[in-house]
């Protein structure tokens, strides 16, 4: 009789656990520590610095929202793409943020979250010439300003290997190079370029080459493949999408057109 009762008890406990959600050890560790260390790229057009030198912009605000959703404080650690990969591999950061594409995550052998924005690259040149270009090959022998380590540099390497690449550290520096005649064109994020060029922009003398279509890439959050934190970040992003937080941030930073529907 005791054996029967024991078996029934085990079966009952097993049945109760069937529908239980398996805990993410890494997420539980982050919650226990009360903080999420985010290595953030401030050399990306998606993340800038405020007057006090703290990370700001769309990705910085989204990282804070994800931390709040997890119930932890976000601690930023300023970095570059290369340094950020090393920080994750060494366990000195929980995730890497700031204009990271799925392709860049794969190249760094990192695990990538669900995408939250679709990145569209574009070419920028003097406004009076922008509409005259119709294909990428026309830029093959030009001087191109590209942000070091970003998708624009990779695109130039792959599609325009004969072009002279002028490496810069920010979108503003790339636009300045074109405006000052140090570069013939720049490869930048379309949302950023659209805000900065043309009528009303800080660089009104520059324009986007609308007739030249460049590839798209998806923005993601990166974690170490051994870290196990991915499910927690994906859950938080899904909730922030459902409650309209991501859409509100996109509207604030003029990125609504880059949102990934659904």
Image (cartoon, helix red, strand yellow):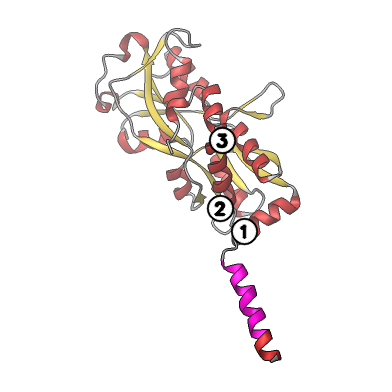
Residue 112 in the image: x percent, y percent? 50, 48
Q: Tell me if I can see residue 79 in this picture.
A: no
CA–CA distance in space, label 3 to label 2:
18 Å
Q: Tell me if I can see residue 139 in this picture.
A: yes
Q: Which residues are magenta?
A: 6-18
Q: Which residue is mark 2?
A: 231
Q: Is residue 8 magenta?
A: yes
CA–CA distance in space, label 1 to label 2:
7 Å
Q: Residues within 10 Å of mark 2 (few under 14, many from 20)?
A: some
Closer to the N terminus: mark 3 or mark 1? 1
Residue 2 in the image: x percent, y percent? 71, 90
Q: Is residue 164 above or below residue 1?
A: above
| Number of marks drawn | 3
Q: Is residue 262 left or right of residue 26?
A: left
Q: Which residue is mark 1?
A: 24
Task: Say which element carries label 3.
Answer: loop
Contact between marks 1 and 2 (CB within 8 A): the answer is yes
The quarter holding residue 132 reads top left
Q: Nearer the viewer, residue 191 or 188?
A: 191
Closer to the N terminus: mark 3 or mark 2? 2
Q: Is residue 178 left or right of residue 15?
A: left
The quarter of the rendered structure image containing the C terminus is top left
Q: Which residue is mark 3?
A: 243
Residue 138 in the image: x percent, y percent? 26, 23
């Amino acid at each position: 009789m005791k054996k029967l009762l024991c078996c029934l008890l085990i079966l009952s406990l097993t049945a109760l656990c069937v529908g239980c959600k398996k805990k993410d050890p890494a997420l539980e560790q982050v919650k226990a520590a009360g903080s999420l260390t985010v290595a953030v790229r401030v050399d990306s057009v998606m993340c800038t610095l405020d007057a006090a030198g703290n990370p700001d912009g769309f990705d910085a605000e989204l990282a804070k929202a994800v931390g709040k959703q997890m119930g932890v404080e976000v601690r930023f650690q300023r970095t570059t793409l290369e340094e950020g990969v090393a920080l994750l591999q060494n366990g000195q950061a929980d995730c890497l943020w700031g204009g990271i594409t799925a392709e860049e995550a794969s190249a760094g052998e990192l695990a990538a979250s669900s995408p939250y924005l679709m990145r569209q690259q574009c070419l920028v040149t003097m406004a009076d010439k922008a509409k005259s270009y119709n294909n990428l090959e026309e830029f093959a022998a030009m001087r191109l300003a590209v942000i070091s380590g970003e998708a624009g540099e990779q695109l130039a390497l792959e599609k325009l290997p004969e072009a002279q690449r002028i490496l810069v550290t920010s979108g503003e520096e790339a636009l300045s190079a074109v405006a000052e005649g140090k570069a013939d064109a720049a490869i930048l994020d379309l949302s950023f370029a659209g805000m900065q060029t043309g009528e009303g922009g800080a660089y009104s003398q520059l324009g986007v080459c609308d007739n030249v279509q460049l590839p798209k890439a998806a923005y993601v959050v990166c974690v170490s493949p051994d870290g196990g934190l991915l499910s927690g970040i994906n859950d938080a992003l899904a909730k922030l999408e459902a409650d309209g937080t991501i859409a509100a941030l996109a509207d604030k930073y003029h990125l609504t057109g880059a949102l990934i529907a659904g």
